[in-house]
Amino acid sequence: MSIKFSEIEIGDSLPHWSRRTSFAEWNRYAAVNDEFVPFHMDDEAGRRAGNEQGAFGMGNLRYAYIVNALHTWIGDEARIHEVACQYRAINQKDDVLTVTGTVTDKKTEEGEQRVYLDINVVTDDDQSTCPGHAVVALA
Amino acid sequence: MTESAITYVTDDMHKLKGVWIDERTSPPISMSDIRKWAIATYWPEQPPRIYWDEPYAEGTRWGGILAPPDFNPFAWPVERIARADIPQPRKTDGSRFTGMNGGQTDTYGAPMRSGDVITARSRLSDWHERDGRLGWTLYTTTEIEWRNQNDEHVKTRMSIGIRY
């Protein structure tokens, strides 16, 4: 999928992008990012870290989901210029994480057609976990 | 307690503010590293072909496979060498901080490709303190810069550390 700068309007939303995440996703991410932190791997370690439900997901993987949702929207010919997020809450096993985004501006800068968005990753009970912003440059 | 009566900021932080330290170089990025990263982060769905299909990627404006922007070329070092620390704050009563990752802003430049070697360096950029929900809290901003073997800017991360 790819988008055209001329067709984007302020207020447009990112297409739906979500993942149900648990050990299958976390362990794969730990394997590639060398991120074997006990509270992401083991329920007892998660409880010792203060999360009653046990192990919890990686902020870095939520960040990857933001990148992936943006890439899915803009396509292979465009590029992501900037992503910012704050880690406000953790995510639990089997949460469905949805990347949300709303276009806030679009302009030509440094020879690129750039689109600005407010972004977030929300859980299935609509808890905000990663508010921030992103800038993508269309081809 | 008033803002002027307490600080977690040390002399070392003042001395090293803005000084680049902790330079490190990644092993060369391989196509297999890129493919596995993309599979893991898109799991259970198939990742975009730009990350794994060479003939397809050659036909794009990039002319070849790219790594996802969030790809970490520094994962899995053979030697676990202790890194030069960004100067750390200190509590005057000797108790330990609770630390949190407050988030980051990443600005991307040249995309990473197979064969690239990335050099990173870090510096303590800024800080501020305030009386927050969890008590007196120090927010530090660390700048981390990545460049490739052609000295092209790859990424700048402004990372927020929270200690209380």
Image (spheres, rainbow, N blue to C red):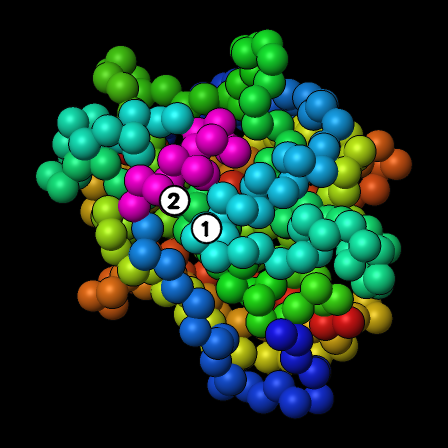
Q: Residues within 10 Å of mark 1 (few under 14, many from 20)?
A: some
Q: Mark 1 and mark 2 in contact? Answer it, CB < 8 Å.
A: yes
Secondary element under disc 2, as helix, strand or loop, is: helix
Question: What residue does disc 1 label?
Answer: B43
Q: Quadrant of residue B6?
A: top left
Asked if residue A30 lies in the magenta stretch, the reply is yes
Q: Amino acid at mark 2?
A: Glu
Where does residue A94 sit, x and y in percent of width and height?
Answer: 24, 52
With respect to residue B101, does A104 lie above or below?
Answer: below
Q: Which labelled disc corresponds to residue B16? A: none
Say whether residue A63 is visible. Answer: no
Tags 1 and 2 both on a single chain? no
Return the residue nearer the eye: A1 or B132. A1
B89, A72: nearer the viewer: A72
| Quadrant of image for the C terminus of chain B | top left
Residue B23 location, quadrant: top right
Query: Is residue B3 found left or right of B71 in the rendered image?
Result: left
Numbered label tally: 2
Residue A131 vs residue B61, the one in the foreground = B61
Tell me: A54 left or right of B45: left
* Quadrant position of the N terminus of chain B in the picture: top left
Q: Is residue B20 above or below residue A103?
A: above
Residue at point 38% right, 35% down? A27
Q: Position of residue A103 (x, y in %)?
A: 53, 78
Q: Which residues are magenta?
A: A22-35
Q: Which residue is mark 2?
A: A25
Residue B148 located left or right of residue B160: right
Q: Residue at x 54, y 56 (%)?
A: B46
